[in-house]
Image (cartoon, grey):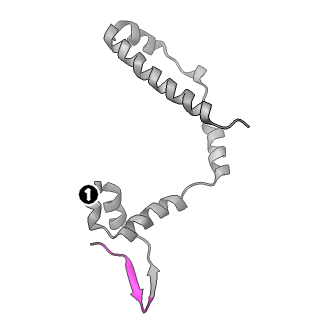
Amino acid sequence: MLRRRQRRDTQTTTQALSAETSDIIANSELHQLEKVDIDDVIEYVNEGLRALPAPMELYKRYLRQKWDVYDLDFTQDAIDWREKMTDEERAVFMRVAQGFHHGERNVEASCPRS
């Protein structure tokens, strides 16, 4: 089991995760994590949370990265829809899209209005 904790008398001190431990946690299947100290997994998650940008930074990123759906060129998509997809493929796509639309409408309806 990989360990990063050290005991000094009755006090426990935390060391940063090694690159090896971080790599193992990041690239392991769930069942493989039983070989990793649970405290290392928790620290790995917490490191990620500490690295999250502040809300205003996220908003500034949004302002820099926002896009307009009208800027997208769907010319090739329209051609593919008409010429490459079968009737059955189009019907399946429409059912999937309707499911997403229904889900989004339910989320919108459940959000409080300001």
In the rendered view, does 24 fall on the left or right side of 112? Answer: left
In the rendered view, tell whether residue 76 sits above or below residue 13.
above
Magenta range: 1-10
From the top left corner, tell me how far across and down residue 47 is, in percent.
48, 63
Would you call the spot at circle 1 few (<14 residues within 10 Å), some (14-19), or many (20 or more)? few
Seen at 27% across and 72% down, the residue is 1
Q: Residue furthest right?
A: 114
Seen at 25% across and 59% down, the residue is 32
In the rendered view, does 73 fall on the left or right side of 63? Answer: left
Dot 1 corresponds to which residue? Answer: 31
Which secondary structure, mark 1? helix
In magenta stretch: residue 8 = yes
From the top left corner, tell me how far across and down residue 69 is, in percent.
58, 23
In the rendered view, tell whether residue 46 sits above or below residue 55.
below
From the top left corner, tell me how far across and down residue 34 is, in percent.
27, 64
Seen at 44% across and 67% down, the residue is 43
| Residue 32 in view here | yes
- Location of the C terminus (image quadrant): top right
The kind of residue on which mark 1 rests is His
In magenta stretch: residue 13 = no
In the rendered view, does 72 fall on the left or right side of 20? Answer: right
- Tell me which corner region of the image, top left, top right, bottom left or bottom right, holds residue 89: top left
Q: Residue furthest bottom?
A: 9
Residue closer to the observer: 22 or 98: 98
